[in-house]
Amino acid sequence: MESGDNFDNLIRGLATQSGEIAKFVCDKSLVHAYPFVSKTLRDAAKSKDNADPPKRHCCGVQMHTGYDDLNELMKTSQDLAFTIELLQVESASEYEHESWQLTEAEKLDSIPTLKDEGNTLYRTGNIQGALEKYRTALGYLEQLMLKEKPNDEEWTRLNQMKLPILLNFSQCKLDEKDYYAVIEHTTSVLSYEPDNIKALFRRGKAHMNVWNIEEAKSDFDKVAALDSTLLASVNSLLKQLSERVKEKDEETKNRMKGKLF
């Protein structure tokens, strides 16, 4: 391996078959920084298995790596041989890029796909998988919106893409019984779309389950006023809510009787 070469180019020269092994020998003049690169990788591997963060020393010049073999390599530089095994071959269409590898345009283009994938996972009952897809899409949108002025045309367009995904995310949270998260996210949607029926309905259910009685009734009443076809569903939920309140009142009365007598 000579100056100007890099591992990307060399690996591209391997045959596209899993299991192939290649060895590259690098002149010592090209790998003087290797001990510190190796130290970083080793520390990162350790931190995954250790709850405590690695200790850091704030020396002006740190001449020791904390690993004897790397310290020796710093003292006596030598050519290094790297052995690379090709574990898996993926086509460009199969490879899933890390978020930091994507351009803004690629992030934007991926959002409809992430939403569709999340919807498919949700329909098959994979709530966690759906949440991850929606969370990734929302993260990309937040990053893109930060670069725009709030309420400008492009910011508004991105926000319109965000709201239905946030609603889907809220439905997953409702299924997980994470009711306060549902209230938070549906309220965000309703701040832009006050008559969004799905947001009102889901928030009403969440309020109902955390005993925000008046808030639940208010949301359900708005749903019924906006869409009469949901009146039966709303009345059923209001009946359940009324029965729960009665049961709660009875429990409270019984507890009070026990204390008085």
Image (cartoon, rainbow, N blue to C red):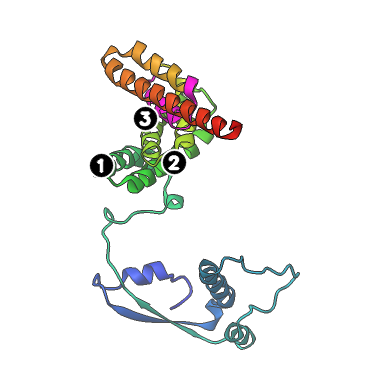
Q: Is residue 201 magenta?
A: yes
Amino acid of disc 3: Pro
Helix, strand, or loop for circle 3?
A: helix
Amino acid of disc 1: Thr
Q: Total number of numbered labels?
A: 3
| Magenta region, residue range | 196-214
Label 3 CA crowd tier, 10 Å (few <14, some 14–19, many 20+) = some
Mark 2 and mark 3 lie on one chain; the one further toward the N terminus is 2
- Judging by the rendered image, the residue that carries numbered circle 3 is 164
Q: Residue 171: x, y in percent? A: 36, 35
Q: Residue 22: x, y in percent? A: 34, 80
Amino acid of disc 2: Tyr
- Say if residue 260 shows up in the picture: yes
Q: Residue at x 50, y 26 (%)?
A: 212
Q: Residue 15: x, y in percent? A: 25, 73
- Foreground pick, 106 / 133: 133
User: Viewer-nearest of labels 2 and 1?
Assistant: 1
- Judging by the rendered image, the residue that carries numbered circle 1 is 120
Q: Is residue 80 magenta?
A: no
Mark 2 and mark 1 lie on one chain; the one further toward the N terminus is 1
Helix, strand, or loop for circle 2?
A: helix
- Foreground pick, 138 / 105: 138
Helix, strand, or loop for circle 1?
A: helix
- Say if residue 155 shows up in the picture: no
- Judging by the rendered image, the residue that carries numbered circle 2 is 140
Residue 2 is drawn in which quadrant?
Answer: bottom left
